Structure formats: structure tokens, C-alpha cells
Amino acid sequence: MEKGRVLIDADACPRQALVIAQELCKEFGWLCLTFASYNHQIGSEHHVTVDAGPQAVDMKLANETRPGDVVVTQDIGLAALILGKKARPLTPHGLVFEPERIAFHLEERNEKARYRRGGGRTRGPAARTREDDQRFAAALRSLLERGETYEVDG
């Protein structure tokens, strides 16, 4: 029987982060579920394939999330939904979204989108490094060891 679940937004998850998550889930006895559109080939024992429509993966993942789950995603909007379900959102770079800071992350995302709509350019993501892998593994390991949930205001 699994201790908990890790749900992964596999559409945008780097391959190495996916491998790390699968290995840690096996080590800690957690179920690892991946979610992706049918446009992506994901090698996972427990995989959910959804339509390729906009936000289809995010909505399926949000609907499947339960309190206590760990959810790996780079989507800040999805992370906010996940926090509302008393689950733990984590980026593939090792950032654990906290209820106290999610409003800041959402505002930062909106500011960058506004800047781009006005003709500005923002830089894309940096190339993934070994340090990113180590940071992600450490953050996920910590969440799995604690297996904790917390109360979210509102």
C-alpha cells in the first residue's frame, strides 16, 4: 500500500526530474502518477493521458489532486489551485510553493505577461543543471520524508 501520491505535470517536466521523482517514490513507497497530453510519450507505469486542448492536463491534474499529495508542476496558476486543495506543489527546480508566497508568484507572472503584451521580451528558462537536479531531489525527498499537509487560509 502506498504512503502517499506524487502527481507530475509531465507535459513540461524535464526528463531527469521525472526520473528522480520515480526513483524517490519507489524508495519511499509513494505512488507516482504522471499526466500528459497524448502528444507526449511518457514512460511511466501509472500514466494518465488527456486531450491536447489548452489547460487539459492542468485541469485533470487539479481534479485528481487530494489533500496530502505532492504535485510537481512549473505552472504557478496550477500551484495556486493545488495549495487550495491542501496539497504540496513543487517545481522541477526544487521550489516548494508556500501559501504565504503564492500571491507574490502570481503577481510576478502577471507582471511578466503584461510586459510581454506591451512588446517587451523576457528571458526564457536557463538550461537545466546538475544543481537543479540536486535541489529538486532534496526538496522532494524532504516532502516525502515528512509526508505533511498544512492548513491553507481562505
Image: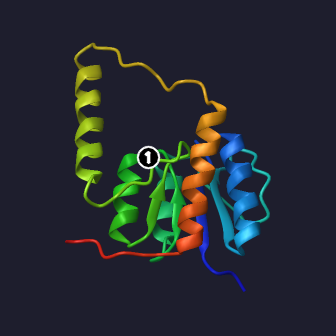
Name the residue: 50% across, 26% down: 125
Q: Amino acid at mark 1?
A: Asp
Viewer-proximal residue, 26 or 84? 26
Looking at the image, residue 103 sits to the left or right of residue 123; the answer is left
- Residue 152, by quadrant, is bottom left
Name the residue: 39% across, 54% down: 97
Viewer-proximal residue, 62 or 1? 1
In this rendering, does residue 13 appear at all?
A: no
Name the residue: 27% across, 52% down: 101
- Residue 140, by quadrant, is bottom right
Colour scheme: rainbow
What residue is disc 1 on?
Answer: 75
Label 1 sits on a secondary structure element that is loop
Q: Position of residue 137 (x, y in %)?
A: 63, 51
Q: Position of residue 79 (x, y in %)?
A: 40, 55
Q: Position of residue 129 (x, y in %)?
A: 63, 30
Where 120 sits versus 16, above or below?
above
Q: Quadrant of the N terminus?
A: bottom right
Which residue, as the protein is rendered here, is positioned at the far left?
154
Looking at the image, residue 32 sits to the left or right of residue 142; the answer is right
Name the residue: 68% across, 66% down: 32
- Residue 47, by quadrant, is bottom right
